[in-house]
Amino acid sequence: MLRVNTVETFATQDGPGIRVAIFLQGCMFKCLYCHNPDTIPMENEEAKRMNEEQILDLADRNRPYFANGGGITFSGGEPLLQAPALLPIVKRLKAEGYHICIDTNGFVRTPEALEVIALSDLILPDLKQINSKKHLLLVGQENTNTLATLEYLEKLQKPYWLRYVLVPGLTDDEEDLHQYGKYVQTLKSMERLEILPYHNLGKEKRKKLGWEYPLEGTPAAIAQDVHRALDILKNYTDKTYSRL
């Protein structure tokens, strides 16, 4: 049984094609800019429980829209926190021929989590900061596990789209971007390096939860910021991507 925060049909931001994105409850990261803070606690009174048959029924009802490379994306929160319950569902979906994406921060490395990764078609990992100390300040955890998961993806030769949230004053330092570029230059299975501009859409959600917004006053990243980051990263890879 999965703890599900929300389900989005006709999702176009969570992998290739038109997808059903299932946002699971719970995350061990406390990202300062999180735009889904209601998914962080493991328990949420508004979350619902969905079993394998309900997930399969949801997939079957939306299957006609998956013709152009679409499928099912498990996101969150951090979906691999629920890997023991997620694994049999992914196995069933794969047996039914569905394309599976996992949107993950790469922290959870249990045997079940690694098997979910191995079974899935495309992974959407985030490496939020190349500098481990800055990563700790940004999300509350160092980046050691995420780097290990990326190494695992490389070992599997598993396709993945790496994402990087560009936050003015936090993740846009020129030296950090050069170090990030030098790292991604070594990655062979990465199909895309996507730069996601920071926005403050999580601000109101945090207020509703009674939480302070730690990035009060931080401006949203604009096109000029994104293009500056892309110009640096393009020195190291031709796989950069932005929706701007």
Image (cartoon, helix red, strand yellow):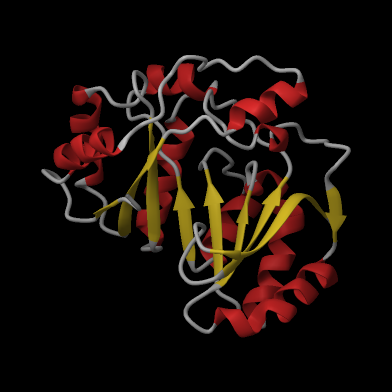
Between residue 214 and residue 82, name the one nearer to us.
214
Residue projecting furthest to the left: 235
Locate residue 11 relative to residue 135 in the image: left or right: right
- Give how far across and how far down residue 55 sits, in percent: 77, 68
Q: Quadrant of residue 71?
A: bottom right
Q: Quadrant of residue 226?
A: top left
- Give how far across and how far down residue 3 sits, in percent: 80, 49
Q: Quadrant of residue 239?
A: bottom left
Locate residue 121 relative to residue 21 in the image: left or right: left
- Give how far across and how far down residue 13 sits, in percent: 49, 57
Between residue 47 and residue 9, name the one nearer to us.
9
Total residue callouts? 0
Between residue 166 and residue 208, name the one nearer to us.
208
Q: Is residue 66 above or below residue 38?
A: below
Locate residue 206 relative to residue 144 in the image: left or right: right
Q: Residue at x 63, y 85 (%)?
A: 64
The reply to whether residue 140 is visible in this rendering is yes
Between residue 158 and residue 53, name the one nearer to us.
53
Q: Is residue 233 above or below residue 242?
A: above
Q: Residue at x 70, y 17 (%)?
A: 211
Locate residue 155 relative to residue 69 in the image: left or right: left
The reply to whether residue 97 is visible in this rendering is no
Q: Residue at x 73, y 66 (%)?
A: 88
Q: The N terminus appears in which quarter of the rendering?
A: bottom right
- Give how far across and how far down residue 125 sits, in percent: 46, 48
Q: Residue at x 41, y 29 (%)?
A: 220
